[in-house]
Image (cartoon, rainbow, N blue to C red):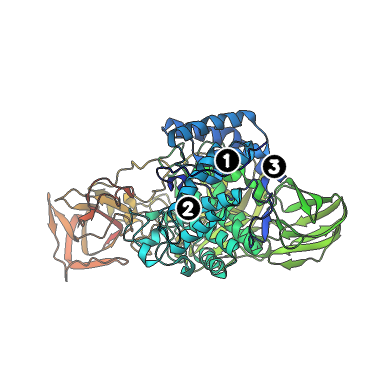
Amino acid sequence: MKAPLPELKENPVKNPFEALAVLGVILLLAWGCTRPAAHEPDYPIRAIPLTQVDITDEFWAPKQEVIRKVSLPYLVEKFEEAGRIVHANLVEAAAYMIMARPDPELEAFIDARIHRMLQSAGSRGVSPTAAAAWYEATGKREMLDAAIRAADEQVATYGPGKQGYISGHQGQKIGLISLFRMTGDERYWRLAQFFIDIRGQEEFRDQGAPEYPDDPTYHQNHAPVIEQDEAVGHCVRALYLYIPLTDIAALTGEPSYAAASERIWNDVVSHKMYLTGGIGSIRQQEKFGAAYELPNLSAWGEICAAYAQVIWNHRLFLLNGDAKYADTLERVLYNGLLVGVSLSGDRFFYQSPMSSYGDYERYAWINYPFCPPNLTRLIAGLGSFIYAQSAVEPDLFVNLFVGSSARVEMDGVPVEIRQETRYPWEGRVRISVDPAQDSDFTLAVRMPGWSRGEIVPSDLYEAADPIPGPPTVLVNGEPLEYELRQGYARIHRRWTAGDVVELDLPMPVVRVRAHPNVRDNEGRIALTRGPLVYSAEWPDNDGAVMNIVLPESAEFSAEFRSDLLNGVTVVRGAVEKIVRGADGRSQETVPHDLVAVPHYAWANRGMGEMAIWLAAREDKAWLEPVPPSPIVAVRSSGGLPRDMAPGYNDQSDRLSAVYDGYDPLHSADESYRYFRMRAPEGQPAWIEYEFEDLTEISSSEAYFVDDRRFCRLPQAWRILVRRGDRWVPVEVEGGYPVERDRFNKVAFPPVVTRAVRIEMEPQNIFYRAGAAGPPDAVTIREDVIWREVGLIEWRVQ
């Protein structure tokens, strides 16, 4: 039996914000809908909590078991090896596991660590969401008491007529709302509302993120939140704001909050979301890019952001009842989130690129290990996303197609609902409805957008092929012409025990095109089937995939392979490959049998090439570059060390990039490789081409890197030719231009030489201690003068 919730005396803590900043986002999944609403207005739709849902699904149940038996204990051990206390999100994950299935051994394992955490940190670092979930699962309230004490200290210090505060990370507000849900104390959610309302106000613009003092968009402090209409800044911080923004819209009924959340959501799904549902296209600040700026190779696609995407879209569904949010949730869940953990459960991604040249892999541990706990708690709490119930109408929603059973009450009548399906491999779903007595209500079954020809709820991606026929619905074996409203087939009837709804969702292989403004995907095609995005990976395609071309005439089929990647449906098709000719320089086209696998399963068989967006034209295929004739050797003053911590996506630097022949999109283009150099003070950076024989040249053009991180345009540059053992500058006409986003061209009198060199003098860029600085974009402890320069392409004629 749970201990009651007595009033707690105020007990100040050293830093109350630390108690709420490192917290979870799932709004008390396990119990949030089991109690009568303590406040009106509120969400008009309530999730059926995971305590009332049993997952038996052949796809998800084994994955949940891997999370329980492998990922959770592995991550706890890794945190302890690193000298850290147990992460609160792992406590939350364990709570959801225990709610789903009592586990005394797991409870004791986590309980001992909670005790050590509280002894070590007191109320600091306690997640209200994890505390509430642990209390609900076990009746133990040590964490909850600490979270309440910290929140009470905040209430006493901040709010209207008191102090204001702009947090750097946004999880604080989610924790306050979680505590309101648990205790019914409205002071908590009203303080969260206050923190949202002051964000972006002029008097608070200089607060929140000292590492980026000149960029308030980083933590969404650039404008009042209800006036914002674009997703900007750090993706995880942004969504950790948009989640409580949606909560406050529900709790206040104030349209301005809901309108802001909807505007920002539309910006994300229309301009800034990858096909996988992942977000974040700029490595610096881990942030959203401009509209349609979605590079594949350098995609940030952070798993924490995918986690937050699931939560935010679920909240928006609860607020608005539209299947477009559940469609987006599903896309992220099966693709952008699930890719974050290996099939074995003990290797992870922090970022999730859309392509790889073969030098990126999952990590065992990383210095910022916060994404695996997020993924772990979401998969553990998956049951709360499957079903929902209207608090206004007699509507029961089926949002996800997962083999499961749920126990609900419809107008006081107990109802059991069961799903049987092989989704996502097959589109047939059998839904059994068993009320304790005959009962009138509406079963609202989501008709996925992908089944109706809508890849995402915008024109960001579109099907290049017609979708065969609409989904069909049978009730007790009889075809039903259903009403489709907000993406749901609404089946209203008097339900009787033994009623069965059968759903058939056609699952052809669909070729997908990106909006033409997504320049990196121009001339490329992606393959999807059902909710799954597919990628071509090296082990199935003769060791390389970047050279695959999908002709317009290619036809694709699906085949289930029980022997591959724990059992997956693969996509096959007769396509083409571009390969080197016998001379090692020319190119030839040969037939190829494509095999593509669900993207979530890539990188489980070692490092190698991978691509979601495959060439639809030969000029978009990629082969490892060879120096163009008459160049026979390429040398440099030295590139960047490949010493980045494992787990970070930094595939860009290769010397061969400067002669690969691809025209950049702009100076920060990371759709292909480039080459960066760091030169000591007083020394230039250089690259040289050696020719096969004496060669006449008279011009050169250079496209410089300006990557929005720490590589800047050169201060100056020049061209030199080799004369004997000396390097001699050429005499250019009109000087050397230094401009971004274009080739910088120079001409000079014809000269015959065996070698040519480009020298670049880096700028001296000053970074102050306390700001985010080079090389890793973390807060630096000392002032730094940084000299980094790079080339995307260098050509001589």
Q: CA distance from mark 1 to mark 3?
A: 21 Å
Q: Secondary structure at mark 3?
A: loop
Q: Where residue 113 sits: x, y (%)? A: 51, 31
Q: Quadrant of the C terminus?
A: bottom left
Tell me the kind of residue under disc 1: Ala
Question: How many numbered marks are there?
Answer: 3
Q: In this orientation, which residue lies closer to the viewer: 406 or 278?
A: 406
Say which residue appears at 57% left-offset and 38% top-offset.
141
Residue with the mark numbered 3: 58
Disc 1 crowd, CA 10 A, few/some/many (<14, 14-19, 20+)? many
Which amino acid type is marked by label 3?
Answer: Glu
- Residue 42: quadrant of the picture: bottom right
Query: Which residue carries the number 1 mark?
Result: 93
Q: Earlier in the sequence, mark 2 or mark 3?
A: 3
Q: Relative to 176, is 758 on the left or the right?
A: left
Q: Which residue is painted at 58% across and 40% down in the image?
A: 93
What percent of the width, then of the height, locates residue 466? 66, 66
Q: Earlier in the sequence, mark 1 or mark 3?
A: 3
**What is the secondary structure assignment of the residue under circle 1?**
helix
Disc 2 residue type? Answer: Val
How far separated are the C-alphas under marks 2 and 3? 46 Å
Residue that numbered label 2 is attached to: 155
Q: Position of residue 146 (x, y in %)?
A: 50, 41
Where, quadrant-wise, is the N terminus in this rendering? top right
